[in-house]
Image (cartoon, rainbow, N blue to C red):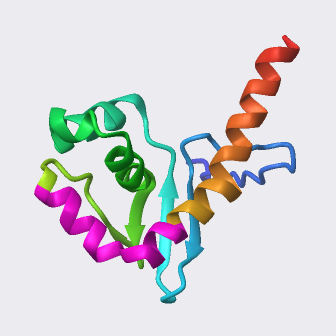
Amino acid sequence: MTKPVKVVINPSAEVQPSKYSDFSVTDDLGRKITVKKPDILARMRFFLAIGAEASANDVYTQMCAPILYLKSIDDEDVPQPKTLLQVEALMQRLGEEGLSGIGKGVQKFILPQAEEDSDVKLKK
């Protein structure tokens, strides 16, 4: 009987995180806010959740859009809201501090990856 072989994989510095990786920041209330780039289905469902009337309101949509990127608060997963009332409850829970934390995470981690992705496409 042969002994099992133990394999250890050490990622190199060249390995880049997936564009759908999770990233964490701390908001002004000290909460750990984890963000993740939403996929197309999450974006579609967001517009269904807020409804046609709210979706037509650009200001409302822009104010709510950051919650698309929210994955968890203090390591507690936050499910994507399915109704307008759930959207508003989540906005109330986050407050300005949480929304600002999401914005910091998106600017620091997600937007640079999107720029890199577009640079790669342009170079091909």
Residues drawn in magenta: 85-101
Quarter of the figure with residue 104: bottom right
Q: Which is nearer the eye, 97 or 115?
A: 97
Residue 107 picture location, percent across and down:
66, 55
The magenta stretch spans residue 29: no
In the rendered image, is residue 6 in sight?
Answer: no
Q: Main secondary structure of the magenta part?
A: helix
* 17 horizontally vs 119: left or right: left
In the image, taking residue 60 as reference, residue 8 lies left or right, namely: right
* In the displayed structure image, the side of residue 78 where residue 28 appears, left or right: right
Decide whether residue 100 is among the magenta residues: yes
How many numbered circles are shown?
Answer: 0
Tell me: residue 14, above or below residue 72: above
123 vs 54: above or below: above
Q: Is residue 99 shown left or right of residue 94?
A: right
**Going by the picture, which residue comes out furthest to the top?**
124
